[in-house]
Amino acid sequence: MDQVLLKIDGGIATVTVNRPEAMNSLNMETVAEIGQAFDELEKDPSVIVAILTGAGDQAFIAGADISLFLTLNQSSAQAGSRAGQIVCDKIAYCSVPVIAAVNGIAFGGGMEFALACDIRLASENAMFGQQEVLWGTFPGWGGCQRLPWLIGRSDAMKIILTGEPIGAAEAYRLGLVSGVYPQAEFQDQVYELARKIAQNGPDNIRYAKKAVAQGASYVTQSGLALENELWGRCFTADEPKKRVEKFFARNKNR
């Protein structure tokens, strides 16, 4: 793996998106490597808890590389949506609990990866946003299913339909994150929680994760299938391509 790092130590697996020069933004190779990392940690019986984070202190995962939108049609858009959904499901239904250590920007697909985790912790500089509507699409990796379940339909719809980001304090108020910490002590706080969980395992922690993840069934396959189909339809009129091209042209002329 070139863009994602996996470290396992003391029962804790850390998956780090390692593209700090690109704010840990996602292309399909990055998405595939995140899935590969979770496949690998699933094979290790010593793992009791996992952490998903981004390299550096500016971004958790800054979202998808929007230049990808220039190449998509309805069919390829649906394929990309499904690929993202599959990896998010690997996180949501991982056999061990997963902590999202949101150490900066979590936009678009990055926020959807955070939503798939069991616990979300944020640094004070963290920002959350489902900004897909600004590019003529909407959250297509499970965000339309998970966000309303986590914070309620009204607040979720506001975030999804406006594309406006929220800060860490607001995310805590909404119940999106379980704690907010200064950047300087953030990593220590994340690993302190991970160690508390790990020392209570291993088997009962896995059982608890399974009971919650499968018992709640808050993300249905029919809901994901509908999200996938409608996300692909966004590309039938080339609206996302027009918006991305306009964005690149505007920035080129600055």
Image (spheres, rainbow, N blue to C red):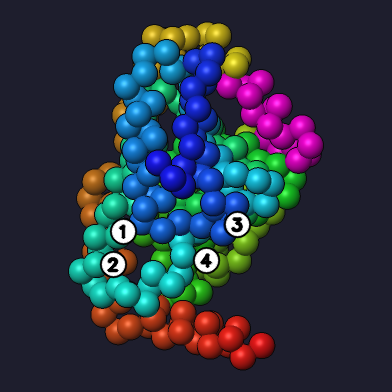
Residue 216 shown in magenta: no
174 with respect to 218 (left or right): right
Classify mark 4: helix, strand or loop: helix
135 with respect to 142 (left or right): right
Residue ID for mark 3: 21
Disc 3 to disc 1, how far (Cα)? 25 Å
Labelled pair 1, 2 in contact (Cβ < 8 Å): yes
Labelled pair 3, 1 in contact (Cβ < 8 Å): no
Disc 4 to disc 2, how far (Cα)? 17 Å
Which of 3 and 201 lies nearest the eye of the viewer?
A: 3
Residue ID for mark 2: 77
Classify mark 2: helix, strand or loop: helix
Disc 4 to disc 3, how far (Cα)? 21 Å
The amino acid sitting under disc 1 is Ser
The numbered mark, 4 or 3, whose residue comes first in the sequence reads 3
The amino acid sitting under disc 2 is Ala
The numbered mark, 1 or 4, whose residue comes first in the sequence reads 1
Q: Position of residue 112 (x, y in %)?
A: 46, 50
Residue ID for mark 1: 81
Q: Nearer the viewer, mark 3 or mark 1?
A: 3
Q: Position of residue 62 (x, y in %)?
A: 55, 57
The amino acid sitting under disc 4 is Gln
Image height check: is 174 above or below 250? above
Number of numbered labels in the structure image: 4
Classify 10 Å Cα crowding around label 2: few (below 14), some (14-19), many (20 and above).
many
Residue ID for mark 4: 131
